[in-house]
Amino acid sequence: MPEDRDIAHGVPPIAVSSTSTLANRTGSWKYIRPIYQDMVAPCNAACPVGIDIEGYMNLLREGKVAEARDLLLRENPMPAVTGRVCDHPCQTHCNRAFFDDAVAIHAVERMLGDLEPEVRVPIPPRTRKEKVAVVGSGPAGLACAYPLARLGYAVTVFESDPEPGGALRYGIPEYRLPRNVLVREIERIRAQGVVIQCGVQVGKGTPWKQLQSYDAMFIATGARVSRPLALAGGEVADVRPGLDFLREVEGGERRTIGRRVVVVGGTDTAVDCARTALRLGAEPVVVCQGTRADLTANAEAVEEAIREGVRFEFKVWPVGVQTARHTEQEPPLEAIRTMYAEREERERLTGVECVRMTPGEADASGARRALPVQGTNFVIPADLMLTALGEEPDLAFLPPEVTRKDYTVIADEFGRNHPGVFAGGDITGQPRTVAHSLGSGKRAAIGIDRYLRERAGEKIADGDPAALRFGGTGNFSITRWRDDDPIRRQSPVNEVVPFEKLNMAHFASVPGKTDRHRSFEERRSSFAEANLGLTTNEALAEARRCFNCGVCNMCELCLIFCPDVAIKRHPSGHAFSLSYKYCKGCGVCVEECPRGAMTMTREGL
Amino acid sequence: MSQVVIKDKIPREELMASGHVACPGCGGTLAMRLVLKGLGPKTIVTLPACCWTIISGPFPQSALSVPLLHTAFETTAATASGVRAALDMQGDKDTTVLAWAGDGGTFDIGLQALSGAAERNEDILYVCYDNEAYMNTGIQRSSATPWGAWTTTTPVGTPKSHPKKDLIAILAAHRVPYAATATVAHPVDLVEKVQKAKATRGTKFIHVLAPCPPGWKTSDEETIELARMAVRSRVFPLYEVENGQRWRLTGDHPGDPVEPYIRKQGRFRHLTPDQIRVIQADVDQRWELLMRRVEYGA
Amino acid sequence: MKKVIMGNHAVSWGVRLSRAEVIAAYPITPQTQVVEELSEMCASGALNARFIKVEGEHSAMAACVGAASAGARTFTATSAQGLALMHEMLHWAGNARLPIVMADINRAMAPGWTVWTDQNDSLSQRDTGWLQFYCESNQEVLDTTVQAFKIAEIVDLPVMIVLDAFYLSHTYEPVDIPEQAEVDAFLPKRVARYKLDVNDPHSFGALAPPPVYMEMRLRQQEAMEQALKVVDEVDEEWGRRFGRRYGAVESYRTEGAELVLVVSSTITSTARYVVDQLREKGEKVGLVKARLFRPFPTEAMRRALAGVPHVAVLDRNISPGHCGIFAEEIRAALYDLADGRRPKIHGYIIGLGGRDVKPENIIDCIDRTRETAKSGKPMPREDVWVGVQP
């Protein structure tokens, strides 16, 4: 440091420095400036439940497993269920699929759902005086009850069946969703203070007016009436709705069903029936009107079914049944009790008469309705025929003031069409998946919370409901509704970040992990879970594959690549501070951000 | 690790200050920042005439928080030798003397002093930040300018008709203990090489490709992407040479076509498809040569 | 300790006694014995220094700049072409105010190729900010070398010691070599005012824009002015300690002189002989030895020459298109003397390219001066070339 005595004529003897360059406000050069602007990952926007998937993936990457699970449980009360049975549109929309393989989100979610709770979560305090009734303990009902309880409401769920779970219990076979898993998830919901009363049939055994003491009501009774199939040959006891079959098996009945089972339809229920029958020792055949591509059933499940030994007959449709009064050529399966006591005394099914189908001319909508091909009739020998053409809700028991159209309830998220009465799940006109049901339950919970708060005189901003949805089109988020996001976001915009905005240079290709499965031999004779998911370590590795699209995860590439040292870690460690005093607006940070969490804006805006 | 986590491998200490007067998106500035991160505060820099003469700020400023000695254009390595000798006499073996020069000061006017220092195996680290022309004086060709490039002294009608000098081979011929290439797009590779060089006694040489938006006629934000493309396309492979004999690649070089890299840069705008094929052929040939060096040694 | 050594080794001994820490040099005739001897001294351990055997003189000075900037006592030696190659870095050392000491063995510039002495190499570096001492004897070379380090480090300016090729560099003379301890007492270890220091980091030599550049040059000029005093003080101290003094300017038998020769370097010895001969005959001829060329000792030169009617300046150099460089500088220095006190200056170009300067050549200069003085006519030209073919 030049001392004072070395200064003369205002300068030291040589050009020796005494200050840094910090006096130069080089930021004044720029006309555009970078900002940190978090966007929405496509998985979040695609999730019918409305889960901050990217958020929990990021927490997992940081090793914060408990925090990750908590974030997940904010939006989804039953991750162990959805991790197993959801079609995971999140993965279909995963940006990583454009790079190598989509992240196995379902397996990560399942891992988190299966974690034993470290501590018993205390029941949330009853901070609200209002009571809410939920009719139906399927996924929609439970998904509505859970957040309401967490918000401080007293919630009672009424269930007509002897056990809670609805379609989860009576529609999804155990090899896909082990009952201990379901029970634990329901316990998780009960642990929030939700009361579940089973064996209560609201609208039939218990009149609606008994629910008048509740401040709000959510109806989610599901679609439980199987669509009928009209066939030549008339009513035969051996032709039964597939859903009933599944219910009976769930009820513990392991009865002889005959060796030859024909399942009609391309639905998930059809595949579930076939695979269940297979496990009971039968040789199931699924007949479908269209091709494999036309099936509505989950493609993975179809693949699994085929590999387990289920036969599919595509472009075929039943036109009649064949029966006989006595047949003992095909002995009942060994070790299985007789299914019907009256068996010997009635007409028994011997075969299903089918016809080959072909796509017809396109109609006005472009759809090509399948038409039978004359003279192609043939018979598939059968002891049992199960129909799985889809289900419809039974709305007859609903109170008359609830608006309905055809088979569905017209529900408004904020309950505006009939104050205090909300509906969700399969009785509303939405896709009939577990995830959509969970999502609708959550939407209703938010609607009920809003309704009750407004009724209590709370001023609630009349915001755009799209702001509650991930990416504007995804499902509602409780976190967004409560505005208590534990993840710090910088100037977030509610837009989905496209793949093009990511910078793949910063990722190395790592193939995705696929679920482990039980062997086919084992599966054919057991209801043990077929899909074993990933190990915890594999799932954590999958979480690390997540791009964290659109959300800063403090990877620091912006900081490292900044030629102007204008980016520093915020002392909190959870954000960066960008010094516009020095930033020259080169845009390297935005260009290099691997996940599209930064953007350039015009200077002065 | 599927996501390349680099922050833990880059020292956090900042030895370069904001407010320096480099152009937006300057590769050479980022190179300095990263190299100093690799070396730490016990570093003395010798700096000839080059962009950094200006970047570091006018008297009484200095953008660096390590000692910095400005020196004449052709003297970087010689001046560094002198600093080293003085430190040796003072018993200071820990401080790294960093001779820091641009391509003009290294490939051209400073090559003699560099050769001298390398032959004497002076215990210095020489880093050339290569922006492929005399940029500080306004984009004149140097012997590091690639074939076909426009500069103000190789106008479009007569673009540069000679290939870029193979400087690492020259250094390898001096059998210096360590020579390497690096780019600003590969910070971990760069910092690791710097740290390796710091731990090695004798003359170390690192050749850093440092894209220059005004000189290359590229967008400011593309600096990193360009350096990355240069490596991917094998225009500027990442490798290191020990004792002039053991050649080793240090990065991924998938061999992307050179054309997108060339087409991104305004200085190559005049090139015809045939001329780009000439560049591709040259890159392929140089790559084969490098592979032979990797396989068989010097 | 008396030793009979060549001029070049006198340089080496001076450097050794000064405990230079870093030496960077490149060989060139007639300087080679300087670096050879220093190499031997370093090899034997007699001198604990890092000797960088650079690949050229430009790098030699650059390395000196680096070493001196890092606080080391630094030395180099060169000659002619080497010095010219260093030119840029001489400015660097000067403007950076680095106390580097250099020996330049005066050698004429090529082409045609020559290794023999004249002063054009060093005088061409006049404006680079270096002190320049022109030495007459090997003893003076050694003494000036040690003095040079002390002066340089006091005023933060580089110093060039100049000696004639062969006439001094390769000529053996008895030299009194002082005791190391006494030299150490005279010249302690260098303490740099500014240096490269990782514990106190600064940049040196950054862009100096118009509002500050000129002030820095002014400070350099003030240091040069200070150096005039320091040269005398150091010389006086040297005299006290070692019994030998040289002065910036030396007057020899100038009492009542009607004609005074101004000479430098080894011509001085020959001129002393001529003056002694003429004084024997009763002629009023004296001699002034110009030892310090930069900073130019204007006052001392005025004191030595004011009132002398005729001054003959013998220049072993030429500024082509003008005249001898010492003559030019002396004319300028004396111009402000009052009429009647201002001598008539007669310039002679002599001994270029190592041509021997014999007593008769000096007498020729004296005769020509007297002739011109008697005729009252102006001189045909300012630079009278002596000893050349007609």
Image: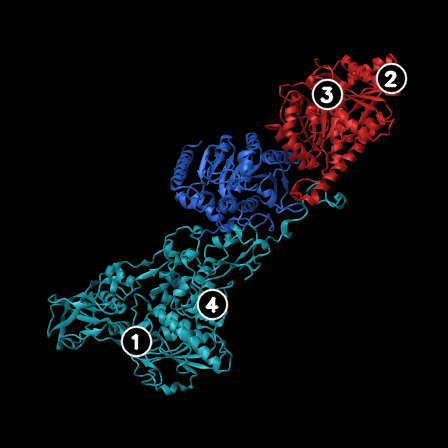
Mark seen at residue A119: 4
Give yes or no for contact between labels 4 and 2 (Cβ–Cβ under 8 Å).
no
Say which chain tag 3 marks.
C
Residue at image mark 2: C284
Mark closer to the observer (4, 1): 1
Q: Give the letter of the cyan chain.
A: A
Give yes or no for contact between labels 1 and 3 (Cβ–Cβ under 8 Å).
no
Q: CA distance from mark 4 to mark 2?
A: 117 Å
Q: Are marks 3 and 2 on the same chain?
A: yes
Mark seen at residue A223: 1
Image height of B172 relative to C315, above or below? below
Q: Quadrant of residue C265?
A: top right
Identify the element where label 3 is drawn: loop
Image position, residue B192 (x, y; %): 51, 43
Q: Are marks 4 and 3 on the same chain?
A: no
Give yes or no for contact between labels 4 and 3 (Cβ–Cβ under 8 Å).
no
Q: Give the letter of the red chain.
A: C
Q: Of label 3 and label 2, which has the lower sequence position?
A: 2
Residue at image mark 3: C316
Mark closer to the observer (4, 3): 3
Q: Amino acid at mark 3?
A: Arg
Q: Amino acid at mark 4?
A: Val
The reply to whether residue C243 is visible in this rendering is no
Colour assigned to chain B in the rendering is blue
Give yes or no for contact between labels 1 and 2 (Cβ–Cβ under 8 Å).
no
Image height of C87 relative to A497, above or below? above
Say which chain tag 4 marks.
A
> Quick check: A519 left or right of C216?
left
Mark seen at residue C195: none
Identify the element where label 4 is drawn: loop
Image position, residue A210 (x, y; %): 38, 87
Q: Are marks 4 and 1 on the same chain?
A: yes
